[in-house]
Amino acid sequence: MKSKLPFMKQKETSLNIPLNNDFNLDDFAEDHFGTSYDTPLRPDAFELDDKQKIEIIESHFREIMTTLGLDLTDDSLKGTPARVAKMYVKEIFSGLNPANKPVARLFENKYNYQEMLVEKDITFYSNCEHHFVPIIGKAHVAYISSGKVIGLSKINRIVQYFAKRPQVQERLTVQIANELKKALKTEDVGVVIDATHLCVSSRGIGDTNSSTGTANFSGRFNEEKVRSEFLNYINAR
């Protein structure tokens, strides 16, 4: 997926959208806004263990399939409710559970590498929180060491952790950036995401050609020269 982002100077755009009695929630969802930087979770979100959640979701999904008129005695369908429930909890929404958060171990920058490190084309699969259909994209991440570094795979794991939950792309971008700043103990972090939303391409407007770009720059990445170097690198093929 080739990035086509011209990139304005962008920082953390507010996602706090006021709701009032005249607000149409269907329009709200169609416009793909989010309501907070944090994933909206109830205080009791983790009182149930994974096994209990799977059992409850399986029961409800069986009811959904039955309501749709599907015959769950068919060999192809009878195991679907259990498969979907396990997939939700253990796979595509596993990033909701803080127990699955990757531990980013820091190492000394023994090479004394002072330039930016870029990890580009990190493929991720997330799900739109408005319709629960896939978001498929690539994340490009860069940072400048403040004296510490992390393993390259940890960058990928941080992206995947925040992607594996119901999301909006703006929030995903900010969450990845904030976690990297926290883990690396530096403000010098840049994150760019280019993604296709199936809620746009497979339903609704049915536009199969468009993609969505978001970015978060902080620290030295707010300097035009540094930001341009990052964007030129990720656009190079």
Image (spheres, rainbow, N blue to C red):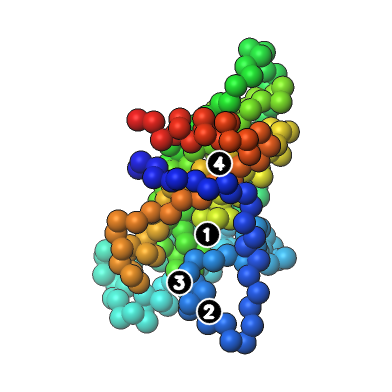
Q: Mark 2 points at which residue?
A: 25
* Quadrant that contains the C terminus: top left
Image position of 216 with respect to 116: above or below: below
Q: Position of residue 46 (x, y in %)?
A: 67, 60
Q: Mark 3 points at which residue?
A: 30
What residue type is disc 3 on?
Glu
State the residue position of label 1.
168
> Is residue 175 visible from the viewing direction of this image?
no
Q: Residue at label 4?
A: 191
Q: Distance between the residues labelled 3 and 4?
A: 25 Å
Choose between 155 and 26: the one closer to the eye: 26
Relative to 82, is 173 above or below?
A: above
| Three-letter amino acid code of the residue under disc 4 | Val
Q: Nearer the viewer, mark 4 or mark 1?
A: 4
C-alpha distance separating marks 1 and 2: 15 Å
As measured in the structure, the alpha-carbon distance from the residue carrying label 4 to the one carrying label 1 is 15 Å
